[in-house]
Amino acid sequence: CRLALHDTATECTSVSAQCHRRTAETQEADQVEHSVRALIREVVRLLSHCPSDAEVDFAKQKWRHVFLRKLQPGLSRDDRCAEICEDLVQNFILRERVPVLDYEYEAQCALDLLEPVPPAGPLGADDDKLAPIRAKEVWEYACSVFGDFVHQRSSSATNTAVVLQGQHCGGFDDDKLAELVRNTLTELHSASASAPLRAWVFHAPQDSLEEIGQALLPLHFANVQRGPGTGRERQWRSFEMPKAQARTFVLSNGIRVCTKDTKDIYPGKLSFQAFALGGTASLNDAEGAAFSFLGSVLQASGLGLLSDLELNKVESKHSASVRLQQHWFHRGLGGSCTAAHLELLLQMICARLLGIEKNIADQPKKVDLVAFERSHRIALDGLDNTAASDAPELRFAEEIRKVFIGDKEPILRPLTKETLLQVTPELVEQLYQEAFTRDPTEFTFCFCGDFSAAGQVDGLGDLLEAYLGVLLPSKSRRGAATKRWPCLPRQLLLGFPEEPTIHTFSHDAIVPSDVPGEGKDEDEARAMVMLGHKVSTGWSPEDELNTDLDVRLACQVAQIKLIESLRTDQHLIYTVNVDHSRNSLAPFGLVFTHMSCHAERADFVVQSALAEFEAIAHSDEEGPTQASVTEACRSVSKQMAEWHKRARGNNSYWLFWLLDAWKRYASGPGAGIAAVRQSQQAAVAWVDDNVERVADAEFFGMRVEDSLARTPQVFRSIFKQRSALVMLPELKTKL
């Protein structure tokens, strides 16, 4: 990166390593020493062996994607210029090769530099095009940066700094670290004659879909057939969704795939989400802890026949990835790819949902033990760091959780070390099988993006059928006694107080009393105030949208009024934010009003805010508050119209609401239907109607006006059940 040091342009190049304790018995000093030695060894290896052009070209691909995205339609000129300049400054050593600050010129220069090196040698002379960066240039730069450090075997005599950062540095001080660096370099130099470091052999990722498919689906790819003459064509059905301008495919195995072409707003890219009912609300404490890092462990365990490194290469080269997701009442998958790699994305989805162990038919996938230990240790270290922290914000957050959420349910309780120590690799494998591989047909998929590469409807339907249509319940685990999913959302035992209450607690803000003037800083005397209100959404999916919109708009009105009254008029608060939070499919939500103020005013601020809410609740009656609330509603209505216009031009907006409508259908009108396939037309129509309620501008505008007209009654029903927390500094702040 480049930075200014004493008004002089300075380049700084860094390499880093991160270590985690593998086992509880491992000494911290040994782990730190191992990481430092490994880092220095790789620097020496790089200076000893020039990387290949193929290896550098592979590294270039990631940054080419970055710059290509900067030039996509939809970004303003200022946004493009700012983002591209930032990338150029921080990620490239361009020196004086880019003389002007024009975003299009800079981006094109970067793309020229990142072109693959032609097999026949460098590009011919071209005044308008920069020659691509070659491996030799990278190696020469590395030698210029690290050469003195490596050959002089010391950091003190060069411009190199070796830094240890973190709570577990194993008791190293500057002298001990310098000695370790010096000894490591000496040992590497001494061994260079008898046992020199070998160059890493770069294995390029598979390139063709057939090669990757055979690696991802070793037992299934040969059976993937589609198109005319294969016998699999038109084994699917499709239903139009005219209001949402989308389409739902029902495959031969019953899987539903909802697709919306958004190439005008998301050209060249595709995103997907999938869900199946039943999530972490059905798990106990240890299972919930295991599920929390299921995705990271499986990602590090590879996919199909691909190791984790090979999988990362494929993802980087082809810009395609699939990740597992966890939620309270459903579990899911999500991912994205370029428009040309939809088939690769489908291969990755199938590989995740089949979950076989290498090339053994119907054998559950084993997690990588090293990956498990690493994720497990990271989680344990995180708990240790949190326990050791005395930050008042962490304590305030924990008090909020205890008062507003409680711990009557496993998913509401904080993770503990005792619970985490119960997690085993076998438990992670069991949850993966139950949640994802036992019956993939439980999942519903939504794809949004550019389908131009998939051709017409028949081509897309055949492609989906060829991969997702062949997924079936696992024979060896079908009907297993441990089956807990799918299941419908249920009421949770929330610990929210039944009666309005106010909780006050203090944090230890130490201010030296013997220093004149200390203790008067506003930050030291600042109090944090949190008001919480419970929102019951009921069990009707049809009313769920209206309830969420009512509460969301009420929060915006409340924030406008608190800013106007408590900050502008009375100067009681510094900041205020009113927001609504609700987990997907949860039968309740919470409204949070977060304010900061001077500690001496905290009690008065709480009472004033509650009084303001009470006034809004009766603003449908004649009084001084009525006109100001009406004006606030007009402001919110205008803001929502502008927000909705921007949101409709966002691919994620469509993906979220299509998926949300299918989730609400599955947990509502479709929950009691035994023969789901017989009601596909009704299901698609229900989802189409619900998407229209949030997507159509005119329809949405009318809903906003109706909700704002109900603002007083929303406040009367929601803002009565309340609880408040106030975090005050200790008295030693000399208040």
Image: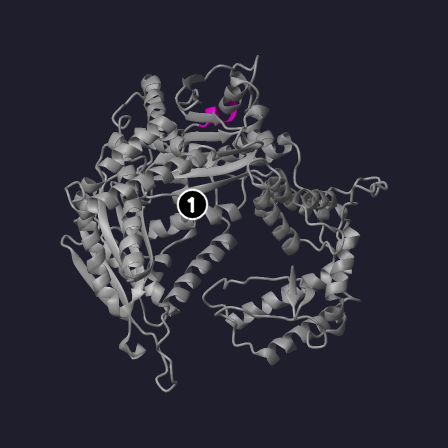
Would residue 438 be seen by someone viewing this image from the given angle? no
Looking at the image, residue 186 lies above or below residue 613: below
Q: Secondary structure at mark 1?
A: helix
- Is residue 296 found left or right of 173 in the rendered image? left
In front here: 24 or 697? 697
Q: Is residue 423 visible?
A: yes
- The kind of residue on which mark 1 rests is Glu
Residue at x-position 50% and y-position 20%:
461
What secondary structure is the magenta-colored segment mainly?
helix
Q: Residue 241: x, y in percent?
A: 40, 20
Quarter holding the C terminus is bottom left
Q: Which residue is nearer to you in this view: 262 or 324? A: 262
Depth check: give the residue in front, 730 or 616: 616
The picture places residue 640, in percent across and down from the top left corner, at: 36, 38
Query: Which residue is drawn at the image coordinates 50% and 34% (left, top)?
Result: 271
Q: Is residue 366 left or right of residue 98?
A: left
Which residue appears farthest toward the right when viewing the image? 125
Q: Which residues are magenta?
A: 466-471
- Residue ranking furthest to the top: 229
Q: Quadrant of the N terminus?
A: bottom right
Q: Which residue is mark 1?
A: 429
List x then y, in percent, for residue 623.
16, 46
* Whether residue 607 is situated above or below residue 731 in the rendered picture: above
- Residue 629, position in %: x, y? 25, 44
Q: Is residue 183 depicted above or below 614 in this figure?
A: below
295 in the magenta segment: no
